[in-house]
Amino acid sequence: MDANKFGCFVADRRKELNMTQKELAAKIHVTDKAVSRWERGLGFPDINTIKELADALNVSITELMTSEKADSEKTDAVVSDVIHVAKEDINERQKTILYSFAATTAFLSVLHVLLTIDWNSKGIGMYFEFPMIAVIPGIALILNGIIGFIRGRKIKGMIPIGLILVILPAVVSCTAYLICGIVNS
């Protein structure tokens, strides 16, 4: 940072706001001699004073530290980019959670069906018990996807994954039941 450039910037902003050095000093709780020193390029404010000085001069901390007014279009573009990246990160995290949840639920559903098979010496038997462990979360995902769509929030894949979780247990159960019937014939 250039002390002279910083001092000119502070002096110009102070004058634009029609403040004296004494008034600026009172706002940020320093002496008017300190403000005079900064404006003459003989030093910088203490780090603890930077935010208060920026607020008093109606500039951002970045503008104060660079000693120039920021281009609002450039600043808006940077903020927009940061928001976009943050939203993408949130969406990726939500997808990871959704896919992990769906995979775990599907695995537990298949495991549930396999545990209903009675492996005995007379043959394979199966008592039919529908694995609600996947159906209930599937219905919840479908409803959440529909509500999110209505509200304008979109998590890609929520409704299709919900449908898969509702249909998968039926397909797995029926397949296992048919295999048991074929093996026992």
Image: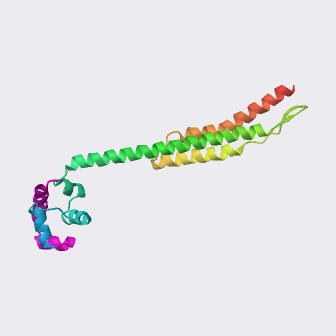
Q: Position of residue 171 (x, y in %)?
A: 70, 33
User: What is the magenta range?
Assistant: 1-30
- Which of the two residues, 167 or 88, is positioned nearer the viewer here? 88
Q: Position of residue 59 (x, y in %)?
A: 20, 59
**Residue 37 visible in rendering:** yes
- Which of the two residues, 131 or 52, is positioned nearer the viewer here? 52
> Left or right: 117 with respect to 49?
right
> Left or right: 41 with respect to 46?
left
Give the answer, above or below, for where 41 lies relative to 151.
Answer: below
Whether residue 5 appears in magenta in the rendering, the answer is yes
Q: Position of residue 176 (x, y in %)?
A: 76, 32
Examine the image and state in which quarter residue 139 appears.
top right
What's the colour scheme? Answer: rainbow
- Which of the two residues, 66 or 161, is positioned nearer the viewer here? 66
Examine the image and state in which quarter residue 84 appears.
top left
Give the answer, above or below, for where 60 lies relative to 135.
Answer: below
**Residue 16 visible in rendering:** no
Q: Position of residue 129 (x, y in %)?
A: 78, 42
Residue appearing at x 20%, y 56% in the figure = 65
From the image, give the main secondary structure of the stretch colored magenta: helix
> Left or right: 110 with respect to 98?
right
